[in-house]
């Protein structure tokens, strides 16, 4: 299945979601690989992980158009980067879905998560004390999944590994809806910045999508 959801976002940005209904062989038939791509693909031994990787690579090319110089590398923090373009990109995958957000001007982050009760067992590992004190009594696993996904999106936007989810990424409380937004902050010695996070549950309520855009900072280009 091609892209099932596409949205233009702030200031020359775009977001897409792909529902994976194709086999790995079908996805392989739709993409041309560089030698480096082949090396990376062959590292994935699990079929579902191969499908995730192929689907978001295909999606990037569809979102960017036929003239895209869609060559990539992973930087020292393990973050996917365009090799020849000064665009910010963030990718995600979970279950049947993969997602991509790309911006020409601003740093971005995205996360998709499948809902499940297991998130309740992990809350102490990623929530601050204040966040724990503001958990709702109803639909707590849904609320927790939004929080986890939001912290993942902010972590990807920041793009470095020196971040603790329970101490350096702090989220405001909010009223849980099918679709909404709330604020979060990255708090480090050298950075204290607030962001707005948008979230939306899938139609069947089985997944959550969260994304964020750093409106306050322009991308540093190689010409800067």
Image (cartoon, helix red, strand yellow):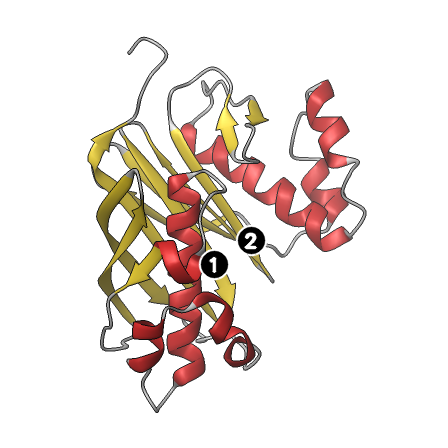
Residue 14 shown left or right of residue 33 in the figure: left
Q: Secondary structure at mark 2?
A: strand
Q: Secondary structure at mark 1?
A: strand
Q: Which mark is residue 164?
A: none
Direction top: furthest residue: 223
Q: Position of residue 45 (x, y in %)?
A: 81, 47
Q: Position of residue 105 (x, y in %)?
A: 26, 28
Image marks 1 and 2: residues in contact by CB distance under 8 Å: yes
The residue under the point 46% across, 21% down is 68
Q: Earlier in the sequence, mark 1 or mark 2?
A: 2
The residue under the point 35% across, 90% down is 138
Q: Position of residue 158 (x, y in %)?
A: 38, 41
The residue under the point 43% across, 58% down is 165
User: In front here: 89 or 191?
Assistant: 191
Direction front: furthest residue: 189
Image quadrant assignment for residue 190: top left
Disc 2 crowd, CA 10 A, few/some/many (<14, 14-19, 20+): many
Q: Which residue is mark 1?
A: 112
User: In front here: 36 or 170?
Assistant: 170
| Residue 114 sits above or below residue 118 on the image | above
| Residue 157 sits above or below residue 88 on the image | below
| Residue 82 sits above or below residue 79 on the image | above
Q: Which residue is mark 2?
A: 93
- From where the camera sits, is residue 210 visible? no
Disc 1 crowd, CA 10 A, few/some/many (<14, 14-19, 20+): many
User: In front here: 47 or 192?
Assistant: 192
């Amino acid at each position: 299945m091609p892209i099932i959801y596409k949205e233009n976002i702030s200031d020359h940005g775009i977001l897409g979601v792909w529902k994976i209904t194709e086999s790995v062989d079908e996805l392989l038939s739709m993409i041309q690989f560089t030698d480096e791509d082949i090396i990376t693909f062959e590292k994935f031994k699990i079929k579902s992980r191969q499908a995730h990787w192929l689907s978001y690579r295909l999606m990037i090319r569809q979102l960017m158009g036929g003239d895209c110089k869609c060559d990539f590398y992973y930087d020292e923090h393990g973050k996917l980067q365009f090799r020849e373009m000064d665009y910010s990109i963030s990718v995600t995958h979970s279950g049947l879905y993969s997602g991509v957000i790309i911006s020409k001007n601003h740093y971005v982050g995205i996360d998709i998560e499948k809902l499940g009760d297991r998130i309740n067992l992990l809350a102490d590992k990623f929530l601050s004390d204040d966040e724990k004190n503001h958990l709702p009594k109803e639909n707590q696993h849904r609320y927790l999944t939004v929080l986890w996904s939001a912290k993942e999106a902010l972590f990807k936007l920041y793009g470095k590994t020196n971040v603790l989810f329970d101490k350096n990424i702090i989220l405001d409380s909010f009223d849980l809806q099918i679709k909404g937004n709330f604020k979060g902050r990255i708090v480090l010695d050298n950075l204290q910045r607030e962001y707005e996070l948008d979230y939306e549950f899938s139609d069947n309520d089985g997944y959550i999508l969260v994304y964020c855009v750093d409106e306050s900072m322009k991308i540093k280009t190689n010409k800067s």
